[in-house]
Image (cartoon, coloured by chain):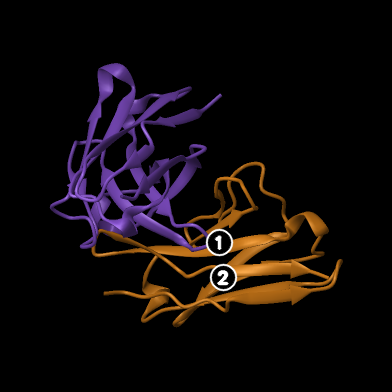
Chain colours: A purple, B orange
Amino acid sequence: EVQLVESGGGLVQPGGSLRLSCAVSGFTFSFYDMHWVRQRTGKGLEWVSTVDSAGDTYYPGSVKGRFTVSRENAKNSFYLQMASLRLEDTAVYYCARGRRWGDFDNGEHAFDVWGQGTVVTVSS
Amino acid sequence: SYELTQPPSVSVSPGQTASITCSGDKLGNKYACWYQQKPGQSPVLLIYQDRKRPSGIPERFSASTSGNTATLTISGTQALDEADYYCQVWDSNIAVFGGGTKLTVL
């Protein structure tokens, strides 16, 4: 069974840092792109970061320079290091597996399996 | 930055067909996905590559794309289909989600 389990969420002060982890099982982790997607309370889904199977990383402008995604294939895990956290980073953070057809640049991919989410609260 | 527009809400009677639209510039040139999210749950992939269903997704879910609009169609809508639905594409290596549509089955 394919499983993704997030951990590391919690309460952090503005300007602080937090590291999220996603442990996976049930598939060959190194073959897949992996993603982080967040959802503020009562709001829609927002993509946060991607580390592809080659280890290349991608970010939206809202987190670029503050968040760093990485993976550790030997541990079937990937991570989101969040720094300079802001109130607006408060959200449920989901990890998701990426299914891709072709090169990353052609945009033909989907988030095909999701974790249960971990809550990050940025508050003083 | 690229944007996808969805209606905030759609209502449908049980057994009827629901259609949820997603609009974006030259959307037909991209590969659209659709996700379902029920309250308190994680999203679930419903449609990928514009119109394909992952295994386990019922046949009553279908989708198409034409021009600037992608459409998710739910045939024979059931009460358990009440959920939020999101479209999503990739644009220049950036993943973009629509704002989501709340489907109410009356």
Question: Going by the image, does B31 lie left or right of A85?
Answer: right
In the image, residue A3 sits, relative to residue A114, either above or below, namely above
Residue at 33% x, 59% y is: A88
Per the rendering, the mark at residue B1 is: none
**Tag 1 subunit:** B
Residue at 24% x, 61% y is: A62
Residue A114 at x, y = what percent? 49, 41
Quarter of the rendering containing residue B20 = bottom right
**Tag 2 subunit:** B
Q: Which SS class for mark 2?
A: strand
Front position in the image: A1 or A38: A38
Quadrant containing the C terminus of chain B is bottom right
Residue B84 at x, y = what percent? 61, 62
Residue matched to label 1: B51
- Tell me if label 1 and label 2 are in contact, CB under 8 Å: yes
Residue A100 appears in the rendering:
no
- How packed mark 2 is, by other alpha carbons closer than 10 Å (few <14, some 14-19, many 20 or more), is some
In this view, the residue farthest toward the top is: A74
In the image, what residue type sits under mark 2?
Ser
Question: Going by the image, does B82 lie left or right of A113?
Answer: right
Front position in the image: A70 or B54: A70
Residue matched to label 2: B64
In the image, what residue type sits under mark 1?
Arg
Alpha-carbon span between mark 1 and mark 2 = 6 Å
Quadrant containing the N terminus of chain B is bottom left
Front position in the image: B39 or A74: B39
Residue at 79% x, 64% y is: B77
Front position in the image: A18 or A27: A18
Question: Going by the image, does B58 lie left or right of B76?
Answer: left
Residue A112 at x, y = what percent? 48, 44
